[in-house]
Image: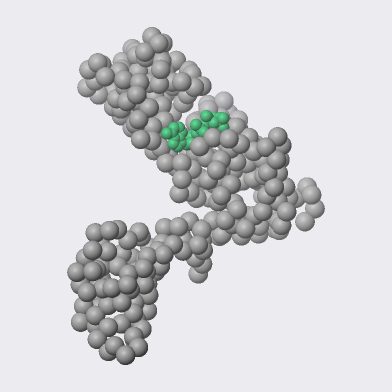
Amino acid sequence: MSESTRLRIAIQKSGRLSKESLKLLKSCGVKFNINEQRLIAHADNMPIDLLRVRDDDIPGLVMDGVVDLGIIGENVLEEEQIERQTLGTPAECIKLRELDFGACRLSLAVPNEFSYQDARSLEGLRIATSYPNILRRYMQSKGITYNDCMLKGSVEVAPRAGLADGICDLVSTGATLEANGLYETEVIYESMACIIQSTNTQPDDKQALINKILSRINAVVRAKESKYILLHAPTETLEQIVALLPGAENPTVLPLNDDSNRVAIHAVSTEDLFWDTMEELTQLGATSILVMPIEKMMG
Ligand code: ATP
Ligand code: MG
């Protein structure tokens, strides 16, 4: 593959998505040497270049076909898509899949002393946000008119600073809202990180590499969501024990040396095994219960 056909992937340079994005690519077997000063990092073992940029730039870079893949919060993607549709500039990209990090929600919030009934309580008021397009779409759908206060950062301090009556901002735990004397009133958009591809038709070898990365991502995410479970079970409670293992299909049942009343069970569970289930298993006579992480899972 020549230099010009190297696969280009954009990820956030520094912020909430950067560490997880890099970790994901590394777990797919892509080896990078990151130089903090450099915008581009070349993979050592695959024809892949990594572009490390502000997250706001990623959707546009993919939609303009400047890069082939991007890892981005759905909130930023949605905001850019509405913006570009309004302007009539290219707004297309392919969402390959949601990822398992970057969970947050875009919510309306008002000061604690504000008596809020529903979104109509904001009629004619000023709302501070970094997401004017998603906010406008929501308010239009409710038929509410309001005034924008566009802020790129520190949105949560806008009401106290007298810049706005309420805010529309990203929330994950709600701690920032609470610390600023605000409460969440309405979730208007739920978001996760996702991986997107440009709609450009790719040369076969490049598309094959995209497919390979995607299939590895699927394997890594599936493995993270699954656990390998080993335990010893009395034969008489075997059925009940198997029924308790969450999402486990056809577990392996093996005899134990010198013990015909007990068997060993090996199972892959597609969910986490919670303490409550572990305790129920013990009550059914299960012993030596081991729950282990799975690194990769294919097929
Ligand atoms: P950049 O400098 O790249 O523009 P940023 O300040 O815009 O960074 P971050 O705060 O790093 O962005 O957030 C990046 C993304 O992380 C958000 O767009 C969102 O998808 C996700 N995210 C998850 N939880 C939160 C949260 N509690 N607050 C903000 N963003 C969150
Ligand atoms: Mg940003």
Q: Quadrant of the N terminus?
A: bottom right
Query: Relative to residue 103, is residue 241 depicted above or below?
Result: below
In the image, residue 66 lies at what x, y percent? Answer: 68, 39
In the image, residue 290 lies at what x, y percent? Answer: 36, 68
Residue at x-position 40% and y-position 67%? 228
In the image, residue 61 lies at what x, y percent? Answer: 64, 36
Q: Quadrant of residue 63?
A: top right
Question: Is 45 or 59 nearer to us in this picture?
Answer: 45
Query: Relative to residue 206, is residue 258 depicted above or below?
Result: below
Question: Is 217 or 244 nearer to us in this picture?
Answer: 244
Residue at x-position 20% and y-position 82%? 236
Residue at x-position 40% and y-position 11%? 161
Q: Quadrant of residue 109?
A: top left
Question: Is 233 or 142 nearer to us in this picture?
Answer: 233
Q: Could one spot residue 276 in this view of the protein?
A: yes
In the image, residue 165 lies at what x, y percent? Answer: 34, 14
| 103 sits left or right of 237 in the view | right
Q: Could one spot residue 140 in this view of the protein?
A: no
Query: Relative to residue 22, is residue 161 depicted above or below?
Result: above
| 259 sits left or right of 75 in the view | left
Residue at x-position 35% and y-position 21%? 180
| 154 sits left or right of 54 in the view | left
Task: Please name the colour scheme applied to the rendered image.
Answer: one colour
Query: Relative to residue 6, is residue 226 depicted above or below?
Result: below
Q: Residue furthest right?
A: 2
